[in-house]
Image: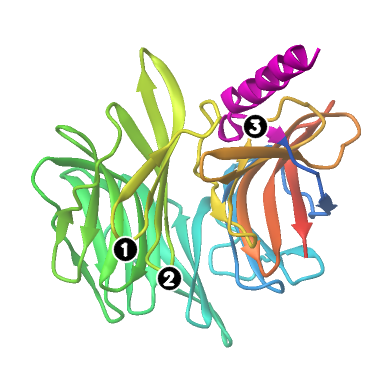
């Protein structure tokens, strides 16, 4: 009898060892709550969300008005969302892209009837910094104290436009770079971009003098969705890797010494809306398997857990698009489609 008990105990221990906790995605306790958002003209598209502490956040995008796209800007004051229509070109065709905090100001990329500009909001109100030329495509934007970049294309090809606080110049990229898909920066002399090159996807770095290949060992047959640059020096890259025609999400982390790649159980989830949460883990919005609830992933190393937002009556598609850390809380901004109507805005908060 004692021998049989020993065998059973050994089997249980063996099974527990085989099922690694790192490979199991367990559900997380949901603590998301709804935040009302003034309706826009549906359908709407959300571009970006940025927060500076618990009392200030901005969400950008565009609505589909009868005469075309219209820019859409919302502000969170710590208590409620409100729509801001006081910026230059608010009533004109166009759209708003990435939003950044630069010192005490808010900077937002604005496509104003096809012409690019940077909106700046200071204590004295709104102003605009026009680009030196019109591009066919405005791909991305980044701004830090003392520098800003806009990347895109015109009829001559790739353009990297750099603002140094007083004026614009065009920056060159390494040979073989065909297109910049995204850009982010930690300082005026530390900017990063992910590019499509003649040999595949690559990561570039600006060191204050020139753009160079950063020699990041990306997984084979992969692309990059986003990069998170942190004051500590840590860098996190999120993207997709293709194996036998199947896409799966990967994450790469640089800790100051080297790069480490993991494949959390996220399927082919895009990492574009990924942020570092107040708990130190990575958070990203996901395509929900419940039509009436949003879904979020929390990633800590190779482990992933999932939580759902509050149930929404008659919802047929709840899609958080972007996340931002707001003090001790996470803010989410996206769209919700209620049966019988077009997608409109939604926001949720976790903690705080």
Can residue 65 be seen in this snapshot?
A: no
What residue sits right under mark 1 in the picture?
149
Task: Tell me, for residue 237, which label it has, or none.
Answer: none
* Residue bounds of the magenta highlight: 1-26
- Quadrant for residue 294, please give it: top right
Residue that numbered label 2 is attached to? 231
How would you rate the neighbour count of disc 1 (Cα within 10 Å): few for under 14, some for 14-19, many for 20 or more?
many
User: Where the N terminus falls, by quadrant?
Assistant: top right
Give the SS element for disc 1.
strand
Asked if residue 61 shows in the view, the reply is yes
Q: Residue at x 58, y 59 (%)?
A: 280
Q: Residue at x 73, y 46 (%)?
A: 345
Residue closest to the eye, 67 or 103: 103
Q: What is the x, y in percent for residue 143? A: 39, 68
Q: Nearer the viewer, mark 2 or mark 1?
A: 2
Number of residue marks: 3
Above/below status of 266 relative to 204: above
Left or right: 230 with respect to 91?
Answer: left
**Number of the front mark, 3 or 1:** 3
Q: Main secondary structure of the magenta part?
A: helix
> CA gap, disc 2 to disc 1?
20 Å
Residue at the farthest front position: 2
Quadrant in the picture for residue 298: top right
Q: Position of residue 91 (x, y in %)?
A: 61, 59
Which is more N-terminal, label 1 or label 2? 1
């Amino acid at each position: 009898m004692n021998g049989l008990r020993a065998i059973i105990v050994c089997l249980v221990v063996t099974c527990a060892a085989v099922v690694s906790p790192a490979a199991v995605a367990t559900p997380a306790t949901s603590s998301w709550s709804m935040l009302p958002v003034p309706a826009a003209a549906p359908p709407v598209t959300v571009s970006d969300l940025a927060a500076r502490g618990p009392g200030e956040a901005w969400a950008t995008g565009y609505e589909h008005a009868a005469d075309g796209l219209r820019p859409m800007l919302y502000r969170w004051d710590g208590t409620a969302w409100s729509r801001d229509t006081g910026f230059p070109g608010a009533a004109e065709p166009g759209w708003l892209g990435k939003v950044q905090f630069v010192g005490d100001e808010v900077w937002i990329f604005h496509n104003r009837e096809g012409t690019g500009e940077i909106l700046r909001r200071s204590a004295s109100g709104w102003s605009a910094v026009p680009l030196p030329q019109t591009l066919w495509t405005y791909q991305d934007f980044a701004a830090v104290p003392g520098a800003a970049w806009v990347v895109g294309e015109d009829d001559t090809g790739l353009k990297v436009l750099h603002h140094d606080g007083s004026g614009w110049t065009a920056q060159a990229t390494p040979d073989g770079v065909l297109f910049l898909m995204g850009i982010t920066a930690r300082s005026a002399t530390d900017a990063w971009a992910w590019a499509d090159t003649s040999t595949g996807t690559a990561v570039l770095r600006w060191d204050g003098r020139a753009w160079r290949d950063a020699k990041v060992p990306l997984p084979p047959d992969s692309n990059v969705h986003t990069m998170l640059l942190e004051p500590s020096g840590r860098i996190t890259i999120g993207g997709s890797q293709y194996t036998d025609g199947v896409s799966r999400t990967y994450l790469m982390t640089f800790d100051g010494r080297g790069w480490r790649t993991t494949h959390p159980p996220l399927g082919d989830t895009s990492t574009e809306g990924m942020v570092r949460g107040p708990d130190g883990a990575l958070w990203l919005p996901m395509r929900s398997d419940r039509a009436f609830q949003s879904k979020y992933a929390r990633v800590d190393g190779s482990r992933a857990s999932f939580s759902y937002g509050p149930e929404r009556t008659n919802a047929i598609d709840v899609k958080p698009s972007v996340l931002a850390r707001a003090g001790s809380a996470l803010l989410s901004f996206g769209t919700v489609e209620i049966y019988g109507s077009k997608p409109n805005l939604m926001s949720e908060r976790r903690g705080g």
